[in-house]
């Protein structure tokens, strides 16, 4: 296989197939693949902007029944350091976000064994009343399924009630790799890939936009990464509901699964192939949280056009020993130094301000 037929397909607006994507991931030259991804980014974003959102990731609890082997954050309910934030603690964190002109609340916990839908409805309504300028971009498909089960609701009823209480959009957490054979190894107690897709498609049907993610570098094979990308692509073909795709690399420290972290080269190849396969998703996010500022900057030339959030707080990845931090000013400077125009955005990619 060679680049030429793939380049011809892309120039003609024809999606590449799984075999071609696997070749790009496993055999093709990194720089050529990156250049191809960068060409697609330039076509989709000719304005030369790189966007970011001012947000906070509030982990309302670390108690989780799923106990995924790749996660260093979860605790059992009887652990000495298990916690559940009360409403006032959450309000204080969101008030601080508003002081920084924040517009997005990314709130996730684990699969808590006792929290029913009323706890979230009361919280979301109060957040909407106190902080109307902040979009509640929270929970994950696995959390929605858990809340529905505990509350004796169908998933659809649960999601609709959460939306009516104030949930505006759903992050793509818990996707890991959307291949059940891999999920059985790294997260055997978590929902299968079809249930993840089910929640996302229902959210899209209700008019909620969502993101999609991929955690790679744990126990999957290259073919699984490609299958994940095409499953995301196929959902997007049906619904058009994904605003962005965020691939990030597994962080092994302090986890049961262990292993080695992916290299920067592997990260850039996955990012580039993601942009090429997911030509129907407008935004591809570079993960400075796991890769650091310099690698995120390089990623802007491998298909990335967004740097995610400023994340005033982040606990899950930090629990695995990865604690890169960047202020809004640092993100702006990083983007400028790479030759792009920094732009602050909303959750749904409306530009609020260029810098």
Image (cartoon, rainbow, N blue to C red):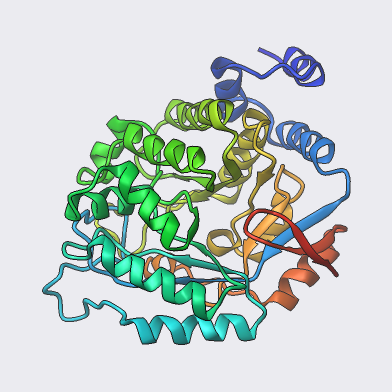
In screen coordinates, is 300 left or right of 202?
A: right
Position of 20 relative to 262 (above/below): above
Query: What quarter of the picture does the N terminus occupy?
Result: top right
The residue furthest left is 78
Q: Where is residue 332? Give x, y as percent.
A: 78, 70
212 or 135: which is nearer to us? 135
**Residue 338, picture quadrant:** bottom right
Residue at 55% in and 64% down: 289
Q: Where is residue 22? Give x, y as percent.
A: 55, 23
Position of 333 relative to 193 (above/below): below
Residue at 67% in and 59% down: 307
264 or 44: which is nearer to us? 44
In screen coordinates, is 310 left or right of 248?
A: right
Q: Where is residue 144? Give x, y as percent.
A: 32, 51
Q: Where is residue 314? Give x, y as percent.
A: 47, 71
Query: What quarter of the picture does the C terminus occupy?
Result: bottom right
In screen coordinates, is 83 left or right of 212?
A: left
Position of 333 relative to 265 (above/below): below
Residue at 57% in and 80% down: 97
Q: Residue 252: tell me if it is visible.
A: yes
**Residue 287, picture quadrant:** bottom right
Q: Residue 251: tell me if it is visible.
A: no
**Residue 271, picture quadrant:** top right
* Number of residue marks: 0
158 or 231: which is nearer to us? 158
Position of 26 relative to 119 (above/below): above
130 or 24: which is nearer to us? 130
Residue at 54% in and 26% down: 238
């Amino acid at each position: 296989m060679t680049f030429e037929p793939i380049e011809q397909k892309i120039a003609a607006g024809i999606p590449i197939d799984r075999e071609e994507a696997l070749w790009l991931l496993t055999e093709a030259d990194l720089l050529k693949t990156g250049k191809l991804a960068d060409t697609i980014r330039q076509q989709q974003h000719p304005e030369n902007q790189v966007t970011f959102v001012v947000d906070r990731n509030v982990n309302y609890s670390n108690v989780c029944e799923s106990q995924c082997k790749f996660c260093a954050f979860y605790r059992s309910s009887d652990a000495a350091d298990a916690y559940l934030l009360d409403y006032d603690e959450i309000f204080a964190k969101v008030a601080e976000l508003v002081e920084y002109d924040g517009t997005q609340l990314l709130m996730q916990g684990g699969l808590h064994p006792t929290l029913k839908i009323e706890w979230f409805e009361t919280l979301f309504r109060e957040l909407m009343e106190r902080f109307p300028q902040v979009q509640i971009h929270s929970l994950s498909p696995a959390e929605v399924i858990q809340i529905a089960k505990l509350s004796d609701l169908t998933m659809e009823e649960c999601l609709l009630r959460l939306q009516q209480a104030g949930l505006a959009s759903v992050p793509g957490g818990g996707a890991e790799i959307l291949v059940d054979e891999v999920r059985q190894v790294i997260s055997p107690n978590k929902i299968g890939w079809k249930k993840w897709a089910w929640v996302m498609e229902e959210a899209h049907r209700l008019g909620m936009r969502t993101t999609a993610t991929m955690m790679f570098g744990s126990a999957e094979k290259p073919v699984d990464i490609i299958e994940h990308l095409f499953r995301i692509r196929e959902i997007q073909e049906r619904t058009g509901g994904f605003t962005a795709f965020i691939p990030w690399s597994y962080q092994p420290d302090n986890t049961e699964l262990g292993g080695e972290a992916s290299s920067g080269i592997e990260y850039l190849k996955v990012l580039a192939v993601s942009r090429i396969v997911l030509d129907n998703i407008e935004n591809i996010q570079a993960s400075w949280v796991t890769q650091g500022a310099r690698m995120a900057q390089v990623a802007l030339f491998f298909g990335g056009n967004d740097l995610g959030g400023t994340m005033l707080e982040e606990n899950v990845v930090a629990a695995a020993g990865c604690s890169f931090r960047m202020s809004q000013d640092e993100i702006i400077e990083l983007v400028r130094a790479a030759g792009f125009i920094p732009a602050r955005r909303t959750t749904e990619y409306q530009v609020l301000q260029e810098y």
